[in-house]
Amino acid sequence: MKTVLVSAVALIDPDGRVLLAQRPVGKPMAGLWEFPGGKVEAGETPEVALVRELHEELGIETWQSCLAPLTFASHSYDDFHLLMPLFACRKWNGIVRPLEGQELAWVKPKDLRSYPMPAADIPLIPILHDWL
């Protein structure tokens, strides 16, 4: 089974809310909510991939030094195994905007379970809730 490395981030605003993005129609798992991020390309570290993805998907700039490793997910789907480090980030420049047709929501940690998420993301919720 192929292992896919995806890097994700819990963007945390000054009110302690976490940003979730809804997967748009036409993508696998459309309609589910997830932490922003994306695939780590060849030659990238997870941090470099996140800096790139946040610029491409949300129009914001951040730096590797602002990404704090928090936890990770390791989950087998039917056709691949996902390995996903989750970073926390509280500092970025720019205004978060949905540049890829996705819906966005700033969510209080206690409300994260109200959003349907991919199976790999669900075990991250209690860790994030306890950390915040």
Image (cartoon, helix red, strand yellow):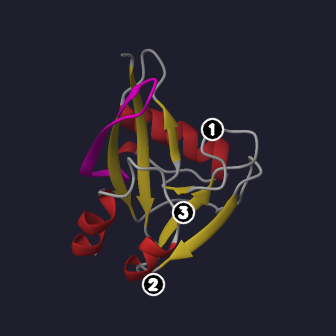
Q: Looking at the rendering, which quadrant does residue 12 occupy?
A: bottom left
Labels 1, 2: front one: 1
* Labels 3 and 1 touching (C-beta < 8 A): no
Tag shown at residue 20: 3
Q: Looking at the rendering, which quadrant does residue 28 occupy?
A: top right
Q: Residues within 10 Å of mark 1 (few under 14, many from 20)?
A: few
Q: Where is residue 71 in the image (x, y as percent from the top left)?
A: 24, 51
Per the rendered image, the range of residues in magenta is 65-82
Q: Name the residue under label 1.
A: 28
Tag shown at residue 124: none
Residue depicted at x 37% and y 58%? 122
Q: Where is residue 61 in the image (x, y as percent from the top left)?
A: 56, 50
Looking at the image, how many numbered discs can be counted on the residues?
A: 3
Task: Provide the secondary structure element on which disc 1 rests.
Answer: loop
The amino acid type of the residue labelled 3 equals: Leu
The residue nearer to you, when weighing 34 against 119, is 119
